[in-house]
């Protein structure tokens, strides 16, 4: 019983309209791998967003008054701030160079997950192009999962992750932004411990633990490997959604 | 290039005074494993704390006035609150059933990491016994590492982890509380991305990513497996300490 994380080498650069499930299916055998029951594919948000053409050119954006106000505080490009606001439900904290928001998907993140690195426009030009998160990452994960389950004839999970900063700690770690077919939370409530005490820790964020581990193998710079096959995920697969990982605002002491 | 996480089976129950490095060294071959250059051993805090006899019997504790005050708010045992305060630098949030503090080691956690599950006293009795975190987890990790490096003749890392709750998200994940011989943070600043932009994400909390992934394989209930061998950690090993993962208070917007 062990968990192995295989980053897939040789995935082509992803462009808008690409069929990610097909690209992954064709890349697996080049790595000597196939899919089997219980496998989880962990996919970096960036290639899902690119395949779904979530690219936006900043020259097409006109900042609102609110965006101009936040841009004065953060010293960010007002057009980028406009996009951050349009992808968010609420601004949580702003400082120079920093804008932390509740994303419309429910999680808290810097810049609503909008990314400027490893992004280029339709003709390869990088300036002014940014990348938004997928419209509905749970749905994206489900779509990729169904195609791959059909093609390989097995039951798998698909996890879409992004790198998030954290309160209190330095550095980013991979976190779930969408999932299909694997549990987000695993509930251990009521299970006795070795001395028949009930467990203090009752809910494990299993998909976030996998997201972080897989992120370790993706790299972040030129050598990025945006798909990791996880073999040996220790909990039973089931239907799930991102919402189970989001702490309700009225239960959150750090908003 | 892949990462495999092997939870070690057959580690005996750990008691105060046990030599953890020796127990681990003797358990590896039972799992068909040995240590090699670049391996990282990930160890649950609980067995380190037990080996170092960080058990405290609550009947020996007299709560202070401050502890009695916090006990009225949290409805926790005032003697436990006294221990939490004695292990902390600052109380960050309190509510019914909840006490979030800055631990004297620098991180933010619930109950200063003090644990009541899977804990028993010298005669196996569970009531009234609790377990504090190791006095100095970096030092504990370094001590275990040096013994194992000597015994196996190779360079490894040792990571001590605990399960932490998080702001904004449900569920716990494994996080670093002490380390030796592997990087906590990996700095990617200045590395160009695919389109020669400098990376937005500059520092990866590599040991926290590993902590989370390994925690997935430890389980939490009766079947707990407190040691995981990680083979294939993708970054160069180096000296490190927990402090590199702690966000300075004046850089933290969520205190």
Image: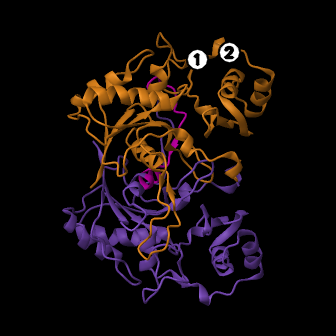
Chain colours: A orange, B purple
Residue A53 image point, x, y percent: 50, 17
User: How far across and down, in percent of the image, does residue A94 sit?
Assistant: 73, 38
- Disc 2 target residue: A61
Identify which residue is drawn at 52% across, 63% down.
A201
Residue B178 percent coordinates (x, y): 48, 64
Q: Chain of mark 1?
A: A
Between A206 and B244, the one lying in front of the other is A206
Relative placement, left or right, of B215 versus B132 is left
Kindly identify which residue carries mark 1.
A56
How far is disc 2 from disc 1 in space, using C-alphas?
9 Å
Q: Is residue A143 left or right of residue A54?
A: left
Label 2: element kind:
loop
Q: Residues within 10 Å of mark 1 (few under 14, many from 20)?
A: some
Query: Residue at the front extreme?
Result: A190
Find numbered disc 1 in the image and state the secondary structure of the residue it sits on: strand
In this view, the residue in front, A165 or B171, is: B171
Judged from this view, the residue extending furthest toward the top is: A123
- Residue B55: x, y in percent? 50, 82
Residue at left 37%, top 32%?
A223
Q: Quadrant of residue B30?
A: bottom left
Q: Is residue B169 above or below residue A140?
A: below
Q: Is residue A165 left or right of residue B252?
A: left
Residue B199 numbered tag = none
- Residue A100 quadrant: top right
Give, as a single range, the part of the protein colored magenta.
B194-212
**First-in-chain label (2 vs 1):** 1
Structural crowding at the residue carrying mark 2, measured as other residues with C-alpha within 10 Å and reported as few (<14), some (14–19) or many (≥20): some
């Amino acid at each position: 019983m062990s968990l192995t994380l295989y980053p897939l080498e040789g995935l082509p650069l992803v462009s808008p309209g690409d069929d990610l499930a097909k690209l992954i299916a064709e890349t697996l055998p080049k790595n000597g791998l196939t899919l089997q029951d219980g496998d989880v594919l962990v996919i970096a948000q960036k290639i899902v967003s690119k395949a779904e053409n979530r690219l936006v050119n900043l020259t097409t954006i006109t900042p609102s008054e609110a965006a101009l106000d936040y841009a004065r505080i953060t010293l960010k490009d007002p057009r980028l701030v406009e996009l951050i606001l349009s992808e968010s439900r609420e601004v949580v904290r702003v400082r120079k160079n920093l804008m932390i928001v509740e994303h419309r998907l429910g999680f808290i993140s810097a810049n609503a997950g909008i990314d400027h690195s490893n992004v280029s426009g339709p003709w390869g030009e990088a300036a002014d192009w940014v990348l938004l998160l997928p419209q509905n990452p749970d749905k994206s994960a489900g779509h990729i999962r169904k195609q791959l389950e059909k093609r390989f004839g097995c039951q798998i999970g698909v996890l879409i992750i992004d790198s998030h900063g954290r309160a209190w700690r330095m550095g980013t770690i991979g976190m779930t932004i969408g999932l299909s077919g694997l549990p987000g939370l695993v509930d251990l409530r009521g299970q006795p411990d070795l001395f028949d005490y009930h467990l203090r820790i009752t809910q494990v964020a299993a998909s976030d633990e996998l997201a972080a581990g897989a992120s370790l193998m993706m790299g972040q710079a030129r050598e990025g490997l945006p798909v990791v096959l996880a073999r040996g995920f220790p909990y039973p697969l089931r239907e799930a959604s991102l919402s189970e990982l989001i702490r309700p605002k009225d239960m959150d002491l750090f908003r």
